[in-house]
Image (cartoon, rainbow, N blue to C red):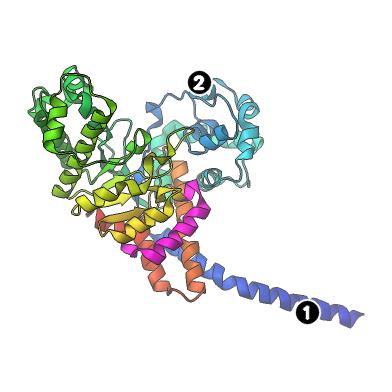
Amino acid sequence: MKIRKSLFVKSSLLFLAVIIGCSVPQNKTYNRLMDYANSLKVINTHEHQRTPTDLEYTKFNFWTLLHKSYLRADVVSAGAKNFDIETVNNSSLDEMWDFFGEYLNYTANSSYYQHFWEGIKKCYEYDKPIFTKVGIELLSKQIDEKYQNYGDWFDECFRKVNFETMFLDQYWAPHNMDIDKKHYSLIFQVNKLVYDIGAAKNVYNDGNMEFVEFKENSGVESINSLNDYLNFADFMLQSAIKNGAIGLKNSMAYGRSIDYEKISIEMATSLFDKSQQLNADEVKALQDFMFHWFLDKAAEYELPVQIHTGYLAGNGNQLDNGKPIKLNNLFLQHRNTKFDLFHGGFPWTGEWVALGKMFPNVYLNLVWLPQISKQRALVTFNEMLDCVPYNKFLWGGDCHFIEETVGSLEFGKKVVCKVLAERIEKGEMDEQTARKIIAGVFRENAIQLFNLE
Ligand SMILES: [Zn+2]
């Protein structure tokens, strides 16, 4: 009996060793790649980082961060009502858990939840596998403390995960050019100037703040013709470049479809000069003209153009606004403009990859895709590797506070390293190439594309 037992123990150990032996190399490869990714100074090509004091929050705790995160949309999608800023400001932690705890629990499976948790774990050394009522109380104390001096806290997290710079898209203040250059690089948001063209004569001459602020230096006294408007837009763009702008950004899918028809200057001029109210088609035609104008300028000034494609954040919008294939004509007509397509075009990831494969001037930015669906990001990154040269891949975080950005970076690295480690294990790729790809995604390709020093 004794002999049999030791034999059983020995064979069990052998079995275990075989199992471990099989799984260790893959983990080792993955861990090596992750170590390498962690050693890189990351160029984060897309952020919306806010200064807490500029926002309407009267306190900062777990629920404040959650309110400003993507995860809020999943909590609302699960059925939560009134998850608004007033409730966050006016409720105790106990009340917040009573209102939203159940719905938060329902989201524990989602990538929004997982990446948010990943960021909190990394920044606050939170060690619980999910957010619990007690855990949230402890976290809230830490958050309150850190947000007393958010600047220092932001910098600490920024350095902890090895960021070099973040491209800042200030959709809430599209023409603010005074940014903290130690942490950020300026992106020029075109939405406003494209949207405004249909009403430029009235709105701008009526004291539009952007126009009032910049009018004196722009040399444009008032806007009475399309030419005046284009001169003003050009002045704004050149000012941004003087202030260090490295690229343009269009996130108009949140407000309209991203199909931009080619409109002649004659047609645009006659619409601009029309004294009657423009109908919806005419407004769209003018906007289409204006975005094409920006694409020409982008080629002239050598600024890549970042475009939101696919899924729309929040809880209610026109999903097909951002279908990537709608941009196809732009890539044909603006061969000298470089396009940085965002978000995997989710859920149309296949056509997004195909566009990156077909056009030398189209780059694929994984930004936000791993947070929307980690699984789809894994599949899509595999497809990108099958189809598209790796000097065209980029990454960004796309968040409002540093914790969520840290979680996004963790998620992004895990997706990229997991896919590459699997390829190495299967003998489909050598490790040196994998490392070049990692460096490309998180740093080198952004330096090349955006001409960074
Ligand atoms: Zn964004």
* Residue 12 visible in the displayed image: yes
Query: How crowded is the residue under tag 1: few (<14 C-alpha within 10 Å), some, or many (20+)?
Result: few
Residue under numbered circle 2? 86
User: In terms of secondary structure, where does tag 2 sit?
Assistant: helix
Instruction: Look at the image and say whether residue 387 sits in the magenta stretch.
Output: yes
First in sequence: mark 2 or mark 1?
A: 1
Residue under numbered circle 1? 10
Horizontal placement of 17 versus 305: left or right?
right
- In front: 412, or 259? 259
Q: Which residues are magenta?
A: 370-392
Query: How crowded is the residue under tag 2: few (<14 C-alpha within 10 Å), some, or many (20+)?
Result: few
Ligand 1 under 8 Å from disc 2 Cβ? no
Residue 75, position in %: x, y?
A: 57, 34
Amino acid type, residue under disc 2 in the picture: Glu
Judge whether 237 appears above or below 27 on screen. above
Residue at 72% over, 78% down: 14
Horizontal placement of 103 versus 353: left or right?
right
* Residue 175 visible in the displayed image: no
Residue at 66% over, 36% down: 134
Instruction: Look at the image and say whether residue 118 sits in the magenta stretch.
Output: no
Q: Main secondary structure of the magenta part?
A: helix
Residue 355, position in %: x, y?
A: 33, 56
